[in-house]
Amino acid sequence: MQPIVFVAVIASIIFLLLIVGTPVKSIRFIGQGLIKVIIGAVFLFFLNALGNQAGIHVPINLTTSVIAGILGIPGVAALAAIDFWVL
């Protein structure tokens, strides 16, 4: 794709959104979901840092971050228990 075409497409999308407006609730929902995924990844990082001596290592990927982000501390505990019992 040519750079001028790429810039033109982005500019037209921005112009269209300025005229039509963006649905605020959907953008807020997506933003809150991304924040939860990031918080889940941070929880897993601390679990891996603290659980290193106990042999607990849960990989940090999108699936485990979503589980830890949505369920919170119980989700991290469930992932640690699954890791401990399965592996």
Image: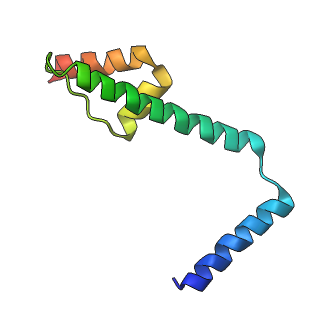
Residue placed at 42% from the left, 16% from the top? 73
Residue found 26% across the figure and 15% down from its top: 81
Give coordinates of residue 25: x percent, y percent. Answer: 74, 39
Residue at coordinates 66% horizontally, 75% vertically from top-left? 9
Q: Nearer the viewer, residue 71 or 7?
A: 7
Q: Where is 44 relative to 63, above or below?
A: above
Q: Quadrant of the C terminus?
A: top left
Q: Is residue 67 visible?
A: no
Quarter location, residue 26: top right
From the viewer's perspective, is residue 52 above or below residue 11?
above
- Quarter of the image for residue 46 reads top left
Q: Residue furthest right?
A: 19
Q: Is residue 24 left or right of residue 9?
A: right
Q: Which quarter of the figure has residue 41?
A: top left
Q: How many marks?
A: 0
- 36 displayed left or right of 30: left
- Residue 20: x percent and y percent? 84, 59
Tell me if I can see residue 46 in this picture: yes
Snapshot colouring: rainbow
